[in-house]
């Protein structure tokens, strides 16, 4: 079955692609549970809050001002609420996926991002600790 | 017996206590160092409770001592000590900000990556783990002017948790696995000397020492015991020994089933289907030929305790074993299964918590950090519990006044 990569021009210097593997129930791939439009808004929120670093970035889905779940883990069972964005093409072309901080240590946001989220009171300190340590963490 | 509690107001991320000093990692990026022993010694309290507050918060070793154990065998003296602890538990022990300022040793900018994932103090060095790796800084306690040393990066990959013993740093590195790193250049106890040595490639989110072995915990895959033997060094002199890696033993073998598990010294614990199972680990028994053949019961004897947990408290987040009992962090509570098998539940989701089983004077402490305070709990029931029969908590040898260590030639039964 054919799959389509949807490419969005976000702003000058930023292009975002919705990657189909994270929406088509691919085995071993975490899955978005939010719409493609919401996925794009999570990316744009990360961009405007400077949560995008040189080659990767981190995002949160906050539809009503509070952090909400945005996807499922690679077994399509456990809800996830952190997005990881990865840059290609000299930080111009980005794509993302629901990040699993329990399973993959590289899916844990950097120390600076965690501190930003904690200082901004986007997530309670206890959640920040659990994400950083790779412990189970529910909203 | 009710636990005792001292409250230290403030916004903290983590705490350590070592050689009389309380290290408070503040959420605003500072490190506050307090003279804890002075704070307790000068606490404004009735004289009749002075002894109890010292036992509880400054010198946990007193009542484990042989002389005190003789005294505690007298029922009237036991009753008196009980009464003092009970009276102290009825006090609202909140540290006064002026007192905290008076006992302040230093207040510095936090030189480590923040927020960190774990910390520990070992041989006057403070080790801090984070997404950036593991950094070490000296924290000599007898210097007139206290200054945290410039941190040195010991490890440059993301780390979940660390634990120190045998001049070796155990490193839980998530899906990179479990490692150990020698802290001394030529230590016989570390594999790979001062270079990282990978003990397992399996997911590891937490780690702790089980004598000279290391227990790695995982929520994603099986937890495991990285088992070592302790052997005489071939080129060593009298009494010189080294650690030798033996094998990995999965929690499925140890507990005959899967679930989040953890361990420390002779106690291995697993939470499964709402039940806590406690295993007694006896590495010295492995040297007996007959036991080498029995993997399931070789060093790990499936004994005893199962304790039911209530569903509302949620799934296991983390666990520890201390002298006073077994601590389980669940999603919505901390549960302490005390050594007398009573259960203390602390509802809520803490920012952080830790115990200090390696400590000499504070092994009855449990520190729990909430949004606006540190709560220093002191558990004191263990002085009155039979150490050879207790299931929950680490064995404490009253004969020596120290926890059971290095049991070469130790008989099978404790």
Image (spheres, coloured by chain):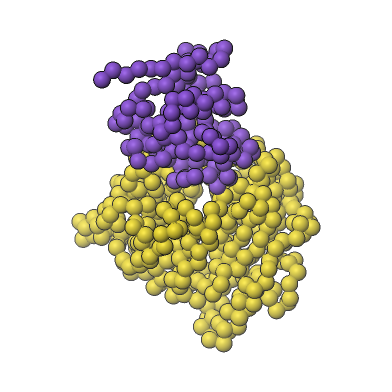
- Regarding residue B21, the answer to whether it shows in the image is no
Going by the image, does B310 lie left or right of B15? left
Query: In percent of the image, x 62 and y 72: which residue is there?
Result: B89
List x then y, in percent, for residue B61.
Answer: 57, 67
Residue B348, quarter of picture: bottom right
Going by the image, does A3 lie left or right of B361? left
The chain drawn in yellow is: B
List x then y, in percent, for residue B65.
Answer: 54, 72
How many numbered discs?
0
Residue B360, quarter of picture: bottom right
Query: In percent of the image, x 69 and y 56: which residue is there?
Result: B9
Q: Is residue B288 above or below residue B52?
A: above
Quarter containing the N terminus of chain A: top left
Query: In percent of the image, x 61 and y 81: which residue is there?
Result: B83
Q: Nearer the viewer, residue B262 or B41?
A: B262
Q: Nearer the viewer, residue A4 or A109?
A: A4
Q: Nearer the viewer, residue A107 or B17?
A: A107
Q: Is residue B186 above or below residue B283?
A: above
Residue B50, quarter of picture: bottom right
List x then y, in percent, for residue B55.
Answer: 62, 70
Q: Is residue B245 above or below residue B71?
A: above
- Regarding residue B77, the answer to whether it shows in the image is yes
List x then y, in percent, for residue B198.
Answer: 38, 38
Chain A: drawing colour = purple
Query: In percent of the image, x 47 and y 45: which residue is there?
Result: A137
């Amino acid at each position: 079955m054919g799959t389509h990569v949807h490419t969005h021009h976000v702003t000058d210097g930023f292009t975002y692609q919705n990657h189909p593997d994270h929406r088509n129930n691919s085995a071993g791939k975490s899955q978005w549970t939010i719409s493609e439009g919401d996925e794009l808004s999570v990316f744009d929120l990360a961009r405007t809050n400077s949560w995008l670093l040189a080659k990767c970035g981190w995002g949160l889905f906050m539809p009503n001002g509070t952090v909400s779940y945005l996807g499922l883990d690679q077994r399509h069972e456990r809800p996830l609420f952190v997005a990881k964005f990865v840059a290609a093409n000299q930080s111009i072309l980005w794509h993302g996926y629901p990040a699993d901080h329990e399973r993959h240590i590289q899916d844990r946001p950097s120390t600076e991002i965690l501190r930003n989220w904690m200082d901004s009171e986007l997530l309670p300190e206890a959640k920040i600790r659990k994400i950083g340590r790779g412990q189970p963490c529910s909203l | 017996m009710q636990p005792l509690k001292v409250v230290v107001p403030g916004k903290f991320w983590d705490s350590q206590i070592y050689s009389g000093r309380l290290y408070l990692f503040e959420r605003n990026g500072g490190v506050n160092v307090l003279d804890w022993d002075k704070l307790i010694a000068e606490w404004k309290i009735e004289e009749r409770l002075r002894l109890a507050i010292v036992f509880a918060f400054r010198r946990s070793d007193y009542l484990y001592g042989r002389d005190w154990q003789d005294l505690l065998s007298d029922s009237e003296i036991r009753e008196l000590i009980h009464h003092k602890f009970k009276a102290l538990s009825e006090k609202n022990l909140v540290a006064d900000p002026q007192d905290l300022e008076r006992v302040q040793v230093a207040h510095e900018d936090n030189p480590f990556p923040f927020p960190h994932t774990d910390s520990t103090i070992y041989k006057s060095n403070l080790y801090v783990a984070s997404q950036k790796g593991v950094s070490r800084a000296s924290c000599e306690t007898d210097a007139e002017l206290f200054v945290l040393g410039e941190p040195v990066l010991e490890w440059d990959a993301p780390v979940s948790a660390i634990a120190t013993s045998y001049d070796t740093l155990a490193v839980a590195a998530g899906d990179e696995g479990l490692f150990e790193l020698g802290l001394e250049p030529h230590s016989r106890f570390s594999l790979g000397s001062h270079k990282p040595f990978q003990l397992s490639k399996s997911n590891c989110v937490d780690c702790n020492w089980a004598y000279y072995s290391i227990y790695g915990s995982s929520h994603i895959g099986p937890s495991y015991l990285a088992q070592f033997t302790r052997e005489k060094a071939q080129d060593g002199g009298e009494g010189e020994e080294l650690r030798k890696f033996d094998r990995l033993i999965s929690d499925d073998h140890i507990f005959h089933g899967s679930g989040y598990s953890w361990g420390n010294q002779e106690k291995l614990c697993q939470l499964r289907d709402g039940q806590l199972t406690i295993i007694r680990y006896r590495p010295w028994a492995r040297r007996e030929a007959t036991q080498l053949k029995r993997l399931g019961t070789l060093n790990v004897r499936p004994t005893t305790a199962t304790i039911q947990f209530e569903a509302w408290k949620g799934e296991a987040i983390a666990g520890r074993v201390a002298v006073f009992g077994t601590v389980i962090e669940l999603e919505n509570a901390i549960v302490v299964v005390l050594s007398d098998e009573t259960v203390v539940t602390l509802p809520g989701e803490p920012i952080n918590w830790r115990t200090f089983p390696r400590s000499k004077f504070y092994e009855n402490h449990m520190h729990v950090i909430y949004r606006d305070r540190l709560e220093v709990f002191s558990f004191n029931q263990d002085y009155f519990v039979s150490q050879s029969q207790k299931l929950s908590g680490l064995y404490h040898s009253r004969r020596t006044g120290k926890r059971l260590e290095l049991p070469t030639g130790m008989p099978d039964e404790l």
